[in-house]
Image (cartoon, coloured by chain):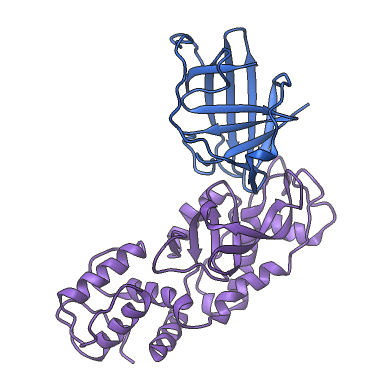
Chain colours: A purple, B blue
Amino acid sequence: MATKVTLRKGAKGASVIELQKLLNKVLKKSSMKIDGDFGENTKKIVIQFQKDANIVADGIVGKGTWAALAQATLSAVTVPASHYLLSDIAARYIGIKETGDNRIGSSEEMREIFEADDLVVNGETDGYPWCAAFVSLCVQKLCSSSILYGDLIPPRQPSVSRFLNNWAKTNNCLIFKPDSEIFTMMKGDIVVFTFSHIGIVESNNGTSITTIEGNTNDAGSREGTIVARKQRSRSIIKSVIRLPMTKMGTDIQLNDSIRYC
Amino acid sequence: MNITSGCTANPVAVGIDCSKNVTSDLSMPDLVLVGTDVVDIESFNKSKEQLSKSYSAETGGAALELSLVLTSEYLTIIRSFNEPGQAVNTKTYIICNSEEGLSSDELYIRVVNNGVLMLETEPGVDGIPDDLWILYDKQN
């Protein structure tokens, strides 16, 4: 399959047909003619996709655009068990609780969470808000257990803003808005809230999102203390992070997607 | 107690016109951030409690604190936002003490039982929403 070659205006053939089919699948409003001819209209639609995907919008389909197409088809076409794994890892920690004031106490799992970043405050590894440390831990475990994410340098971030603005951006994560017309939030995505908080998507029924979050509120409490499952409105979600797969994972995803188009 | 008008960022109160009423066209949000939960503001009753000197909140990824100094004319509020491993972000608000309400162009406050609800319309930092009240608990 020749889908990974760089395509630009003027290209013709089977790879262009596959590209056009993928774009029609991903862009719900696109009904591009499938003619195998990368003309002005195909370029226009590629640029539209690139803009929505937050990548360089030059109309040339190279490695980055193919990877973004693979990410987009995760939710549109196939059931990616490997992507779901992040949420399954997080679910194993549900109910794990601090002892108050963000302290580990005697919990081995809480120790794992706080040691997932490199922060030490006054000689202590705990004692600070830990939702980003929890997500860092889950991504670390994903990277060590799934070959499709083995290339990713896992985060060790205690800070939500650095997780999004530093780690996710420099590691080629796909970052999109919750109201994106192309990318649909799905199990295994990471959500950053409009306030300083971060969690992992467990499901999306179209109207509300179920997440698994660290340092979140127990029922009726005023302060986060626990790893818990939460129902969330998309209105309080600022950004969605989708982890990048290895080249092998991207190829597998694209080939699966094209088969279903 | 009601406090109104004012400015932000500069802790020096000189130049604040407390005779000017704050007229707000802002559509006030009706949701409050309580820890990491978002609840309806109707859950909170206004209180006539005296303001305390300090309040705090935690949002899952950050600790927030308020330090208050009240004089007969002004209320000074220093808000700090602390994400672990990051420099602390602080912002100082000075608002007038009047009968009109606890608000300025950039800051709205409501006193509730054992805390305050605070809304910053221009917080200037990622991690503090400009469309949600935040519940801060009173510190003893």
Q: Nearer the viewer, residue A48 or A55?
A: A48
State whether residue B59 appears in this view.
Answer: no
Q: Who's the residue at 24% across and 86% down the image? A: A34
State whether residue A52 appears in this view.
Answer: yes
Q: Who's the residue at 53% across and 39% down the image? A: B29
Instruction: Please count the marks in the image.
Output: 0
Q: Who's the residue at 46% across and 15% down the image? A: B21
From the image, which quarter does the C terminus of chain B lie in? top right
For this orientation, the residue located farthest to the right is A106
**Residue A127 quadrant:** top right
Q: Is residue B34 left or right of residue A69?
A: right
Where residue A15 appears, as percent x and y from the top left, is 27, 87
For this orientation, the residue located farthest to the front is B42
Q: Is residue B86 above or below residue A131?
A: above
Q: Is residue B80 above or below residue A59?
A: above
From the image, which quarter does the N terminus of chain B lie in? top right
Q: Nearer the viewer, residue A72 or A148?
A: A72
Q: Nearer the viewer, residue A229 or B4?
A: B4
Where residue A102 appears, as percent x and y from the top left, is 74, 47
Q: Is residue A174 above or below residue A34?
A: above
Where residue A50 appears, as percent x and y from the top left, is 31, 67
Q: Who's the residue at 63% across and 70% down the image? A: A87
Q: Is residue A257 left or right of residue B77?
A: left
**Residue B3 quadrant:** top right
Where residue A173 appears, as percent x and y from the top left, is 45, 65
Q: Is residue A13 above or below residue B13?
A: below
